[in-house]
Image: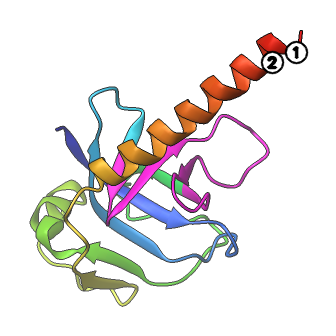
Amino acid sequence: MKSEIKYIELKTGFSHNGPAWIGLVFFSKSRKTLYFNGKAFQRIGSDRVSGNFYDIETGEEYWISGVKKDMGDRHIYGHGKIFIEKRILNDYLKIINKTNLNEPNYVLCEVEEDLPIDRINEIENQKDKFKSEDEKHKQIHK
């Protein structure tokens, strides 16, 4: 499973000040689903939202993007600490061309490393089942 270091920020209920992480994100084979911190995300297809991904289980919106070399990951009007996953710290320091993270707005943290693939597949299968039943219902009532 492919992975990349990404910036992840919760947008629902927070605007530009939501909890934020820099961590290792894993991609499904199709790259349509991203996994991070025990959650699964899919891209939002609408321009009327503040995030570009949503949590499949909760519907909460997140902004997920590549990390910036200048450490300017938060929105210009946003503020708050950014949690950095401990296991990727050395790789992140290489990306930003630093030898240590001596910044007051960053906190090292652990995240849930188990990928919820089976749980998410079950949710997705239930969605597909309801879609199929709805389509059958529409065909019957034409």
Nearer-the-camera pick, 140 or 92: 140
In this rendering, the answer to whether 128 lies above or below 84 is above
Q: Which residue is mark 1?
A: 141
123 to 82, vertically: above or below: above
Q: Three-letter amino acid code at disc 1?
A: His
Residue stretch in magenta:
34-62
- Asked which secondary structure carries label 1, the reply is loop
Residue furthest right as drawn: 142
Q: Quadrant of residue 12?
A: bottom right
Q: Is residue 15 visible?
A: yes
Judge whether 47 appears above or below 8 on screen: above
Q: Is residue 141 left or right of residue 44?
A: right
From the top left corner, tell me how far across and down residue 3 is, in percent: 21, 44
Residue 65 location (% of width, % of height): 44, 49
For residue 73, say whether it is visible.
no
| Between 74 and 42, the one nearer to me in the picture | 42
The numbered dot on residue 138 is 2
What residue is drawn where x is 47% and y is 52%? Answer: 64
Q: Position of residue 99 (x, y in %)?
A: 11, 72
> Which residue reaches farthest bottom?
104
Reply yes or no: does residue 106 show up in magenta. Answer: no
* Numbered badge on residue 73: none
